[in-house]
Amino acid sequence: MPDSLKICRTRILFAVLVSLVLYGAYFFHLVRHEHKVLLTRNGALESLGLLAVPGTDFLNSLGTVFLLKSALFFLILLGVVLVVLQLLSLCFRRSWLRIVFLSAILGGLFFLLHGDRVAIAFPLVTALSFATFFILTLDAHIPMSRKHLAVFLGLCLVASLSLFLGEKKNFFIKARDRLLFDCAFGNRVISYYYTYSPLAAAVISPAQGVYQGLVYQGTYNGRPFQHLGNGLVLSGRKSVEKGADFRVEQNGQETVLINRYGERISVASTDAKTLRAEAERLFAMKGFKQLTRISLYAFPAGLLMGLFLGVRLFAESARVFLGVGVSVGLAGVILIAVISFQGSHRLETKPGKDLLNDKGRALAAAYAFYEQDRLPEEALPMAQDMLKADSVAIRYWGAKLLGVHGFNSTSPALLIECLEDPSPNVRYAAALSIYRILGEASLRILLPSLLEDPNWYVRCMIFSKFLQSGTIPHRA
């Protein structure tokens, strides 16, 4: 192998590493800022006697490593796709074509994020990454014929389209159930997601709902707080002003709502419905949220294209490159299709206990009953037995199906036992089913899990049921 080619490959890999470090540092900053926001907001809410999720004690105990792992969500979803686009630019022989290609991507980011609070910061970090990559790989080139490039771009498009259509068939849920739940590596992936995702999700979620929003209005002289609905709380206490997401101020004859970043909007009144609607309008991360959704479907295409370009960079033979690329691409598309259509047929026979010995058939039955939102009486014993299965996926769907069935003399007791299940997925599924069966009467049962469950995601899911009932738990 010529020394010049080795140097070229080394520089490309170094440029990729620099780009990933830049994106990682930015996403860490984004998550760390959101952590501080949650901390100040939850402290303000707790000063009113409210129980905030997950609580200031929990947030204070997280540490830097936790924030880094949360930031990995954005690095994987957005950073990897953008780095692959940088690698794709190396297929252009002429520098000016690379500049046009990268500038078009930057322009798209500016357009998508124009109303967000990261409208300048994230595109600037991307521009710095692109410029650094361009300079470090100025004389580098990945040899790719137009025919090969068209073939691989077509495969990437088909992969993303397959994932988009597969979601309509619950691809992500089925992939979790069949590939991840019951294997050691898969369980680690799921545990990682449900442990670290809430903090990352807070960045792209409005400051209400599970992440309770706080509105400060100095002239409000009512109770210590008023629940406006959907987790949005209004208070006139001075102690909450610093941690408030929004402030209501009087500007002459005009009443304005101001978010924590200084953006403001006129409001016709300060009733609960109006404040909820206007607070939603002032949430300044809609474009970034849309970008992450686009990246979710572009992610398999990004992985495939990254693999294609990597193989081409290191493969001497175009035939080897073409064979490996097409084989892997088609395998990915077929995998998405097979998983998406598994368990889509209706259950034709009455389920019996022997069904639990076949995980595939048991899951197919669960999907069919859950889609119908009805569990026949003859299938109730099967659902109850599912709670005792070794498979996490089957226990999870057993808990879901008991909620679909509704009240039975033994169902609430069985589900309460599931609140101690080692799997957080089973615990939150059981909690949601308990609420579905018992309604507001379940809140007292669920309160200990809301306070003590070790998994943040489980607490958030339980808290959402309190909010759904119009209740925010408080010490009184």
Image (spheres, rainbow, N blue to C red):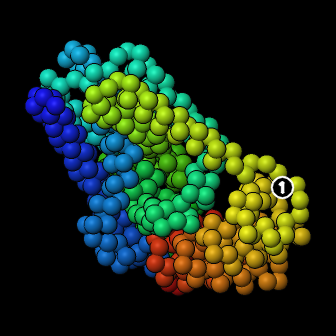
**Are there few (<14), some (14-19), or many (20+) residues within 10 Å of tag 1?**
some
Give how far across and how far down residue 374 sits, in percent.
Answer: 83, 61
- Callout 1: helix, strand or loop? loop
Residue 150 pos. (x, y %): 43, 19
- From the viewer's perspective, is 16 left or right of 219? left
Residue farthest along the left direction in this orientation:
3
Q: In this view, does 462 lie above or below 141?
A: below
Query: How far from the left and from the top, in percent, is residue 283?
Result: 43, 47
Which is nearer the eye, 336 or 228?
A: 336
Residue at 34% from the left image edge and 54% from the top image edge: 72
Among the 4 quarters of the image, the one containing residue 341: top right
Residue found 73% across the figure and 64% down from its top = 358
Front residue of 154 and 168:
154
Residue 453 left/right relative to 360? left
Whether residue 459 is visible here, answered yes or no, is yes
User: How many numbered callouts?
Assistant: 1
Q: In which quarter of the image is residue 46?
A: bottom left
Q: Where does residue 34 sit, x and y in percent of width and height?
A: 33, 58
Q: Is residue 248 rendered to the left or right of residue 390?
A: left
- Which is more toward the observer, 369 or 413? 369
Q: In which quarter of the image is the N terminus?
A: top left
The residue wearing badge 1 is 347
393 up-or-down from 336: above or below: below
Amino acid type, callout 1: Leu
Taking the spot 54% from the left edge, 78% from the top edge, the residue there is: 422
Look at the image and tell me whether residue 231 can be seen.
no
